[in-house]
Amino acid sequence: MGQGYTAAIVDMQGVVTAWSDGARDLVGYTADEVVNRPAHALLAEDIRADTVANLSGIVVLRHRDGSSVPLVLTARAVLGEKGEPSGYVITVDPPGDQEPTVAGQAFQQASLPMSVFDTTQHYVRLNDVACRIMGVPEEALVGQHFPESVEDRPAHRGWLDHLRQVVDTGRPVRYESFTGAPALNREHSWTTDMWPLRNADGELQAVGIASFDSTEQYWARQRLALLNEAAASIGTTLDVVRTAEELIELLVPRYADFASVDLLDWVFEADGLPDIPLQDFVLRRVAHGSGLKGTPEAAVRVGDTSTCSPSSPPAKAMRAGRAVVSQAGEPEFVRWVAKRNARGPAGSAYRKGAHSMLAAPLRARGTTLGVVVGVRIANPDDFGEDDIVLAEEVASRAAVCIDNARRFARERATALALQNSLLPRGLPGQAAVEVAHRYLPSGSLAGIGGDWFDVIPLSGSRVALVVGDVVGHGIPSSATMGRLCTAVRTLADVDLPPDELLTHLDDLVTHLASDESGEAAELGATCLYAVYDPVSRRLNLAAAGHPAPAVLQADGSAALVEMTAGPPLGVGGLPFEATEMELPEGSVLALYTDGLIEDRDRDVDHATDELCRALSAPVDNLAMLCDTVLKAVLPEEPSDDVALLLARTRALGADQVATWDITPDPERVAAARQAATEQLTAWGLDEAAFVTELVVSELVTNAIRYGEPPIQLRLIRDRTLICEVSDGSSTSPHLRRAHAFDEGGRGLLLVAQLTQRWGSRQTGRGKTIWAEQPLPQG
């Protein structure tokens, strides 16, 4: 440019009146060729109006050789005697000139990109770093509108919006973006500060810009965000496969272009123990994913197994317990890709370009479960040290979730097996009711609950129907359910009324909860106990904190039984109240646990209405009615176990029952024997007459001798022949060994030897001694 000062003076009419040597060197015109000529004759392009108004901006002059010279122009008024402008001194600094000041040199040589834009977002200045990033010299950009120099992308549109914001508001802004640049081969993160530049009069004339490459900080934040997301998104279910899928969704495509999760086979076994082979690792693919639809890069399908040699990166990672990185060109990486190509040749084209692989062990509680593998193909960056740390942290969290899911599945299977072993499989034979049942274990994260049901034959052709629910979930609840189920059967064998049975059961639960086992919180329970008598057709029932059953009458109407439910078992000290009602033959009684009608998002009254409507549905049998009820009442995903027991009542007709009132006189024993024999003949059961006469004789004699009136004899012809003798005494008989010279004491012993079973039960008016014998084979 020469050493002269670059300046010119233009009068108020736009005529050049002075021309410096620097100006001559810049555009090639001598002073004789320019002075006294219009200044606009030197322009290659018209000056924008805002440049004229601001007396500063970019102008493009025509060089003497015909080329264009972009310049940064600044005009300062020359004042006359009265202070009015008489002309302008114009100075220009061409882009690329050596800065004359230290401040200018600092701008030009700064280590971060800096630039200056005018108020219309046209380039005014760029420093060396900015030019390198843009990939062109400063002269090619000065005077150009910013949108014309970059691709139309959201980040660039945001950059332009912030430039305009500075001009509009006169305040500095900070803009963060993740984008590329013409001379960069990958995207970078930028933190850009934009601030207004003002002249001596405080008027905004340009916008200064400085950008900081914050890519490392950006990826550090991304890794931290990934870890935070891993904590929230991995392990939302206690399902091994779903947990693996959540890990893949987290890694692809942000962290890897392809990722897979493979687990050792023992993880899927119910009683599997950790097995880390010393040689080849056999892994089962649980989940994989990629940025391409269908994951064409995968050589192993989900569910299939693959063998990893000891030298492969996944095997090394599992053996060492730490992440292993392998890059393109390394022998292990080459062998690994070749093996995949041999197994899945159709996907070899998609594996082309794979350049970096990272394998991280899935290790939880000191046990290796499998390995997660990430591969980069389109992503140009190789896995580095920061990626190793991230992979190990994410894999560790995922491994704990997978192990939790594995343990939950194992405990669930154990609890379900325990519960199935305790629940009745084939219900015992009895003629009082026809039954059907369904048990649906919960699929919730809480685990299997403690719901149970039972059908218990009682003396006199009666039957007990039981439904209960233990507080809690898992193996402890199933074990407690087994205790209570056994206790109910034991108490039912004593033939206690429902309210008394629940009182004894409540005492048992209270006792178990107060022992030293620390299981008090797990021993709360509810129970419904009902006894149906097919002779009287009456139902006697009581509940301990359990929902009332529903009854479908023979006329097709269904409603809940009106009863008072006592407190749950284990509360102690409060009474239970029994309810008695008549059930016509053919009525259907529905007993269920609260999981059928109760849920966080359901109204109990609405659910019970649905239950009653479903019971009224016309179906062919009780099994179909069970399915109809469950389909109509249950939500798609029940949150609790459900037990449903349906019982259709039967009745014993007058031709199956014979009753005689006995006068308390020993001479009436013979008449009782004769009446029983005649009844057996009428029933065609003459073969049972000998044993029946002996049983009637012994039981009636004992009632007359040791009991109290009224005394009654009853014969019931059901699946067995039942002989019952009732009296007004509450004293229960018992067997004793008679001595050789005793005259009595052998009656009950003979009854026990000759009949199938015998026993006694308390009644509201005394007791009943009964004995059953099989019917003669016809």
Image (spheres, rainbow, N blue to C red):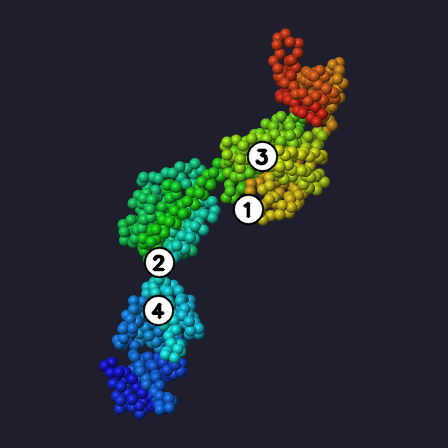
Per the rendering, the mark at residue 379 is: 2
Is residue 16 at least partly visible in the picture?
yes
Which of the two labelled residues, at mark 2 and mark 1, occupies the earlier sequence position? Answer: 2
Contact between labelled residues 4 and 2, with CB atoms less than 8 Å apart: no
Characterize the local packing of mark 4: few (<14), some (14-19) or many (20 or more) Cα atoms within 10 angstroms.
Answer: some
Badge 2 element: loop
Residue 68 in picture, x, y percent from top left = 31, 81
Characterize the local packing of mark 3: few (<14), some (14-19) or many (20 or more) Cα atoms within 10 angstroms.
Answer: many
Q: Amino acid at mark 4?
A: Ala
**Closer to the eye: label 2 or 3:** 3
Left or right: residue 728 versus residue 18 is right
Q: Amino acid at mark 1?
A: Glu
Residue 139 in picture, x, y percent from top left = 31, 76
Q: Is residue 448 above or below residue 652?
A: below
Where is mark 4, residue-wise?
210
Image quarter where the N terminus lies is bottom left
Is residue 614 at least partly visible in the picture?
no
Instruction: Measure the C-alpha gap from mark 2 to mark 4.
Output: 28 Å
Quadrant assignment, res 765? top right
Badge 3 element: loop
Quadrant assignment, res 778? top right
Where is mark 1, residue-wise?
637
In the image, what residue occupies the spot 68% across and 38% down? 563
Q: Amino acid at mark 2?
A: Asn
Which of the two labelled residues, at mark 3 and mark 1, occupies the earlier sequence position? Answer: 3
Q: Is residue 679 above or below residue 560?
A: above
Q: Amino acid at mark 3?
A: Gly
Where is mark 3, residue-wise?
570
Which of the two labelled residues, at mark 2 and mark 4, occupies the earlier sequence position? Answer: 4
Per the rendering, the mark at residue 269 is: none
